[in-house]
Amino acid sequence: MCQSLVDKVAQSKQLMAVAHPEILTLFENWLEELEDEVIRCAAAQGTDVDELAEATGLSRSGARFLISKLRREGRL
């Protein structure tokens, strides 16, 4: 949990270096909503990349990335 928070803070600092703070906040909110949607879809239909991509409107690589990220964080 603490490492996840530290990682998120580090990632935010990196993004702040290249993005306007208001845009960064919008992006972070969007990503959190998307992660929640992937978690809900995965609970309902599993973690098949093609199915999650279709259900969420993501590309296959985007779905694969979020599945890996959520698994690393222990959220999936």
Image (cartoon, grey):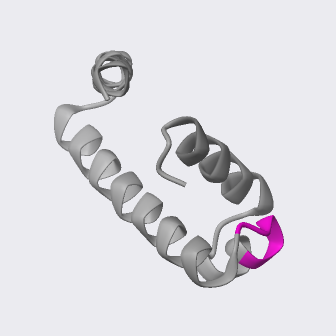
Task: Determine whether, in the image, residue 61 is placed left or right of residue 34.
Answer: right
Question: Residue at coordinates 57% horizontally, 36% vertically from top-left?
Answer: 72
Question: Residue at coordinates 26% horizontally, 51% vertically from top-left?
Answer: 26
Queried whether the magenta region covers residue 48, the answer comes back as yes
Please state the horizontal and vertical placement of residue 13, each as a whole percent of the image.
29, 17
The N terminus sits in image quarter: top left
Q: Which residues are magenta?
A: 47-51
Residue 14, above or below 41 = above
Residue 12, above or below 60 = above
Please state the horizontal and vertical placement of residue 7, each as a whole percent of the image.
38, 20
Task: Determine whether, in the image, residue 44 is placed left or right of residue 53.
Answer: left
Please state the horizontal and vertical placement of residue 19, each as a whole percent of the image.
32, 29
Residue 16 sits in which quadrant? top left
Residue 55 sits in which quadrant? bottom right
Instruction: Assign the magenta stretch its main secondary structure.
Output: helix
Please state the horizontal and vertical placement of residue 74, each as a whole percent of the image.
50, 42
